[in-house]
Amino acid sequence: MAPAGASVEVTAESGAVLATSTVAVERLLPNRTYGVHLHMNPCGLTPEDAGPHYQHAHTHASADNEVWLDFTTDGSGAATATATQDWAFVAGRLPRSLVIHAEKTRTAGAEAGTAGARIACVTLTER
């Protein structure tokens, strides 16, 4: 689901009151929807090493409290998604990875925020 040779570019920026995150991918599977979230920990040897979703202030999964960057690739496997939150990333508690999931993010009910298996991970670094 994340073929060899696929590429991902991520930016996650924060001002005083807004956070904007963008992901651009190339050479993933064509015409496919993926769930994408910022996570708390860097990538590791297992998919679970990236930890839970980055959450701003609450303990519930929602597009207002987390950063969801779901996308559907085009015929060549490319896509771009941007999310802007009306809050800033918290200094000392920044997102440390972006995880691509196998399914679109569910938005309602007990499964809100879930998006299937973790299929790719990119560790984020500060600049």
Image (spheres, helix red, strand yellow):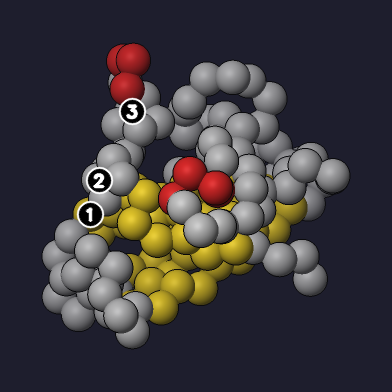
User: Does the image show residue 70?
Assistant: no
* Depicted 56 relative to depicted 25: above or below: above
Locate residue 48, reporting x and y percent.
Answer: 48, 44
Among the two numbered marks 2 and 1 on one chain, the one whose residue lies closer to the N terminus: 1
Q: Residue at x 20, y 80 (%)?
A: 76
Q: Residue at x 53, y 31 (%)?
A: 64
Among the two numbered marks 1 and 3 on one chain, the one whose residue lies closer to the N terminus: 1
- In the structure shown, which secondary structural element does the residue marked by tag 3 occupy? loop
- In the structure shown, which secondary structural element does the residue marked by tag 2 occupy? loop
Mark-to-mark CA distance, 1 and 3: 15 Å
| Quadrant in the rendering for residue 44 | bottom right
Q: Residue at x 38, y 72 (%)?
A: 25
Instruction: Give the number of the disc on residue 105.
Output: none
Quick check: 43 left or right of 116?
right
- Read off the residue under disc 2: 103
Quick check: 73 left or right of 83?
left
- Read off the residue under disc 1: 33
- Read off the residue under disc 3: 107
User: Does the image show residue 66?
Assistant: yes
* Depicted 70 relative to depicted 6: above or below: above
* Depicted 82 relative to depicted 41: above or below: below
Query: Quick check: marks 2 and 1 in contact, CB under 8 Å?
Result: yes
